[in-house]
Image: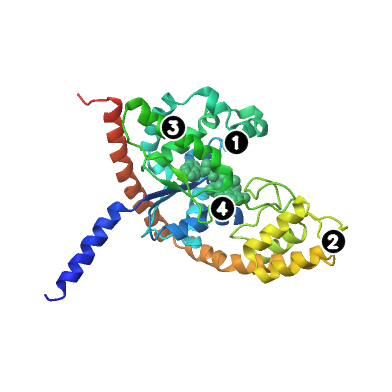
């Protein structure tokens, strides 16, 4: 009995603390396997956050319908991302890991937010304009209202922080606008205004291997290195990455494809390795072939343990199903509470 006091004290503290923890949320669309861009732009932060925040991480399968309207094997792709989240280190005991379509309350909040979102502002979102260019035959209303669905994802758990890559900055800005507008219209301080989250303050952009732009799931063959990728394929892709004929002056500024290789190296290699090739570039002795070989080996070293974990978890159906069911239950509980309160704020009353 003597040492019961400190134990009870600790228990109460822990209990109280879990209520006080700030809320973090992020999602990834099931449109292809996770790559290094997803890992370093998003998932790496998820893992660091799960110990100290009340975290919700989900698979944005509703969102994927805006670009993949006839999704072949939608369930298989959702499952794959779930496996990859787990393999990368998301712990379902610490974070709530769930599938967006398991929480239909999100759709109701999306509807409410759409009532106060204006066509003009949605049309100005860069990712919308990009998608209009990319899929002119399928400019659907879901694409236009992508930011309101994303805001609903964030606000359904009243999240404060959203760890995402730089490409999501503007969508997040819209979520902030919609949260503030809701509070303003209904005269309540209900939704927190969500903020982007990154440990280094700067949002990360991992470049692709094709010389320009970001690494992406759908940016074309050879652009992305996947967490599940085998060694031979990584080597082949890296050796084919775009370069040029080499520097023509000492200390020359690096053109984009070369700067991208250096940036990728700074992500997976040791600082001394980056320094070695940087010096070689500056004194014009660099051999891109050697640099790429090193980059490929360092990528392989990074990816190998995650790839092995992916295989292991992928074989365990029972575990995957259990994680998904547990996540859905926890996420719905929080979502139901928010929707109930939102309905009351807007003025719906049960008869
Ligand atoms: P993709 O663009 O490959 O389809 P998603 O749009 O599903 O990937 O992105 C999921 C998460 O990964 C988002 O938080 C996004 O910001 C991040 N992300 C994707 N690509 C990159 C990248 N190249 N660099 C940094 N973060 C990225
Ligand atoms: N739009 C995000 C992407 O393409 C995915 C996403 C959907 C998301 N809903 C979200 C990210 C809510 C953060 C929070 O990457």
Residues under labels 3 and 4: Cα distance? Answer: 24 Å
Could you tell me which quadrant the C terminus lies in?
top left
Residues under labels 2 and 1: Cα distance? Answer: 39 Å
- Which disc, if any, is residue 41? 4
181 and 59: which is toward the camera: 181
What residue sits right under mark 2 in the picture? 250
Q: Is residue 227 left or right of residue 3?
A: right
* Percent x, y of residue 341: 28, 35
Relative to 288, say whether 255 is above or below: above
Q: In this view, does 322 lie to the left or right of 172?
A: left
> Which residue shows up at 30% across the image and 52% down it?
20
Q: Are marks 2 and 4 in contact (CB under 8 Å)?
A: no
Residues under labels 2 and 4: Cα distance? Answer: 32 Å
> Which residue shows up at 37% across the image and 40% down it?
192
255 and 156: which is toward the camera: 255
Specify whether tag 4 is near ligand 1 (CB below 8 Å): yes
Q: Earlier in the sequence, mark 2 or mark 3?
A: 3
Specify whether tag 2 is near ligand 1 (CB below 8 Å): no
């Amino acid at each position: 009995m003597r040492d019961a006091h400190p134990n009870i004290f600790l228990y109460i503290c822990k209990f109280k603390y879990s209520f006080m923890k700030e809320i973090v949320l992020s999602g990834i669309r099931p449109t292809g396997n996770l790559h290094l861009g997803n890992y370093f732009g998003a998932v790496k932060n998820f893992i660091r956050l799960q110990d100290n925040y009340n975290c919700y991480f989900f698979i944005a399968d509703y969102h994927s319908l805006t670009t993949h309207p006839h999704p072949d094997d939608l369930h298989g792709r959702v499952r794959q991302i779930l496996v990859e989240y787990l393999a990368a280190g998301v712990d379902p005991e610490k974070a709530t890991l769930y599938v967006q379509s398991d929480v239909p309350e999100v759709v109701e909040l999306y509807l409410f937010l759409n009532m106060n979102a204006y066509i003009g502002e949605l049309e100005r979102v860069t990712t919308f304009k990009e998608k209009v260019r990319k899929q002119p035959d399928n400019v659907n209303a879901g694409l236009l209202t992508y930011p309101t669905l994303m805001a609903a994802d964030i606000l359904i758990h009243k999240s404060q922080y959203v760890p995402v890559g730089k490409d999501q900055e503007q969508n997040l800005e819209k979520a902030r606008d919609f949260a503030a507008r809701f509070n303003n219209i209904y005269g309540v301080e209900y939704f927190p205004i969500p903020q982007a989250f990154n440990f280094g303050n700067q949002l990360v952009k991992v470049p692709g291997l094709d010389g320009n732009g970001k690494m992406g799931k759908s940016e074309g063959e050879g652009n992305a290195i996947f967490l599940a990728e085998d060694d031979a394929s990584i080597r082949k892709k890296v050796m084919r990455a775009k370069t040029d004929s080499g520097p023509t002056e000492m200390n020359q500024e690096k053109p984009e494809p070369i700067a991208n290789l250096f940036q990728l190296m700074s992500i997976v290699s040791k600082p001394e390795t980056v320094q070695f090739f940087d010096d070689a570039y500056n004194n014009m002795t660099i051999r891109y072939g050697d640099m790429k070989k090193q980059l490929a080996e360092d990528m392989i070293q990074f990816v190998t343990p995650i790839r092995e974990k992916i295989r292991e978890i992928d074989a365990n159906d029972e575990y995957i199903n259990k994680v998904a069911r547990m996540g859905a239950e926890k996420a719905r509980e929080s979502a139901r509470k928010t929707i109930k309160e939102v309905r009351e704020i807007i003025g719906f009353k049960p008869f």
